[in-house]
Amino acid sequence: MRPKFGIIGCGNISRFHFNGLEKAGADIVYISDIHEPAAKPYVDKYKAKYSPDYKDVIADPEVTVVSVLTSAKYHKEICLAALRAGKDVICEKTMANDGAESIEIAQAAKTSGRLFYTSYMKRFFPAVQKAKELLPQLGRLFSAQARAYQNWGDSLYELDNGDGQQWILDAYGGAVIKCAGSHMIDMTLHLLGRPDSLYAHIDYISNSRVDRKANALFEYANGMVAHYETAVHPLTRVGYERNSWDEKLEINGVNGRLEIYTILWDQPENNGALLVHYDNATESSTEYRYPSLDPFEAEMAYFHTCLTDRKQGQPDVIDGMNVDLVIEAMGISAAQRKAHIFAWPVNL
Ligand SMILES: NC(=O)c1ccc[n+]([C@@H]2O[C@H](COP(=O)([O-])OP(=O)(O)OC[C@H]3O[C@@H](n4cnc5c(N)ncnc54)[C@H](O)[C@@H]3O)[C@@H](O)[C@H]2O)c1
């Protein structure tokens, strides 16, 4: 059966969902935003029903899948209501405000038997998919380095107080960790799995909960350690393309190394993401270069196919929960200045 989409939240990120769904040939039948002007262009374009109240979208029997694109503080309420009403769900990242909310959503999704996707679209870069395929060739893994630097100018360093930064917490529930940082946590977990423990340091703007830099060691049972770093920064000519987008995951195994460089995905004039595979046996490096693409288009096409075929696929609700639990653990570890040992939820 063809999925029928209800879209809740028509802000910044929604245009990539609309575009991806349109290119996938999806049926968008109902749209909600509390601010009608935000929804109107899409309502007109797709000749969809409109309501400022998301509950109307969820109550409509025509809607089979709900895309939750509001800020994270509303995700739990909307996701749970959608699941209760028997709808499938696509939820933007981060899935929820904190670990407890994420576990609640994951349990509800599992109990409901509905399909649930968390939108970590960077997994859909061909370079990342190729890295996943090549990973077993690295043999025993011993080290990884993950970096997500996001250029926000020098505002978060110059303006060293919490005033005026509340919007970041309102919009995303946090600053750099929830924004650029969460993607690289997802990519690290996607390729390396859940860590057993972590140790983190977080630099906040003085007297605030606005995180502008975070470092962590993700520790794995076999001695493998992933070094993770995310930061807002003012450096204009750093990164793979020297355009300030500085995002990389390097994984080292006894047989070789993978380096993934991801790019400014919303600017297709840039190169595609790059993968470099160094093979120690032949002492040779292979570069995998791909055409530039908007990973949301690949992600929405995939979700649309999964929904049509009634197939779960990933990233799913557990992937969303895992990232939220890592983010929460980083906060706990940094506050306590000691390692956090994970007790991953049983059966999830
Ligand atoms: N994947 C990415 O790279 C990426 C980038 C940016 C944002 N995001 C995520 O996307 C989500 C939305 O972020 P954004 O930047 O688009 O935020 P935004 O503030 O621009 O948009 C959110 C929209 O939701 C609407 N809204 C709020 N409450 C609502 C409700 N109860 N019912 C209906 N509409 C409601 C708001 O009016 C607004 O138009 C967040 O979870 C964020 O973390 C992901």
Image: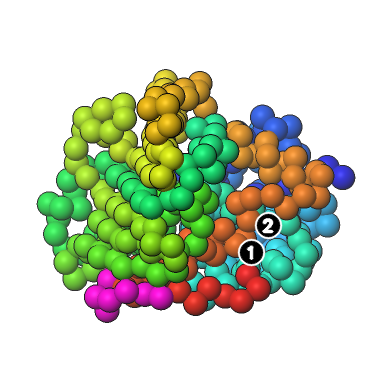
Q: Find residue 104 and report its horizontal and vertical position in percent.
A: 60, 74
**Tag 1, which secondary structure?**
helix
Task: State yes or no: Cβ of the residue under disc 1 lies below 8 Å from any atom of ligand 1.
Answer: no
Please identify the quadrant where the C terminus is shown.
Answer: bottom right
Please give the range of residues in magenta: 334-341
Coloring scheme of the render? Answer: rainbow
Of all residues shown, which one is farthest toward the right?
1
Residue at 36%, 75% in the rendered image = 340
Inspect this view and state whether residue 57 appears.
no
Q: Is residue 96 magenta?
A: no
Tell me the residue that label 2 is attached to. 116
Q: Which residue is mark 1?
A: 79
- Looking at the image, do the residues carrying marks 1 and 2 touch, with CB atoms under 8 Å apart? yes
**Which of the marked residues, 1 or 2, is nearer the chain's N terminus?**
1
Quick one: label 1, few (<14), some, or many (20+) residues within 10 Å?
many
Look at label 1 and name its amino acid.
Cys
